[in-house]
Image (spheres, rainbow, N blue to C red):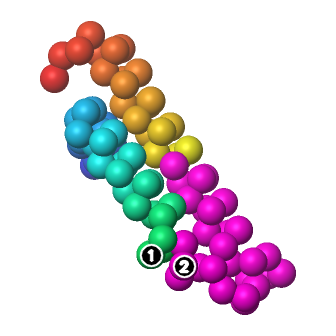
């Protein structure tokens, strides 16, 4: 029961249109100078440069966020737009 309530709360928060804007701006900030320079080092993690891991991880995370938003939108359309 608790898990269902948590799922409902998360889906309700993801329905906010402002969330899309916040995630877009966060993505822009994370892919620009201050953050990219942190990971632009000559060190490797498991034989892969840190910058490549940073970009790949950010890309996968953004795909996951879009997936969550699409799930929230489909859940809203299935319920008929009722709150």
Residue linked to disc 2: 37
Picture residue at 30% right of the left edge, 42% below the top: 21
Identify the element where label 1 is drawn.
helix
Q: Position of residue 28 (x, y in %)?
A: 43, 55
Q: Nearer the viewer, residue 63 or 55?
A: 55
- Residue 74 vs 29, above or below: the answer is above
Q: Which residues are magenta?
A: 36-62
Circle 2 packing at 10 Å, graded few (<14), some (14-19), many (20+), is: few
Q: Is residue 4 left or right of residue 44?
A: left
Residue linked to disc 1: 34
The secondary structure making up most of the magenta span is helix
- C-beta proximity under 8 Å, tags 1 and 2: yes
Q: Is residue 56 left or right of residue 64?
A: right
Q: Which mark is residue 72?
A: none
Picture residue at 41% right of the left edge, 21% below the top: 74
Q: Quadrant of residue 19?
A: top left
Q: Position of residue 34 (x, y in %)?
A: 44, 75
Identify the element where label 2 is drawn.
helix
């Amino acid at each position: 029961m608790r898990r269902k309530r948590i799922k409902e709360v998360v889906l309700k928060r993801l329905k906010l249109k402002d969330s899309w804007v916040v995630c877009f701006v966060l993505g822009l900030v994370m892919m620009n100078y201050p953050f990219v320079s942190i990971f632009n080092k000559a060190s490797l993690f498991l034989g892969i440069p840190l910058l490549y891991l940073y970009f790949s991880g950010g890309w996968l995370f953004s795909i996951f966020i879009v997936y969550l938003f699409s799930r929230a939108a489909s859940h809203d359309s299935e319920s008929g737009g009722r709150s």
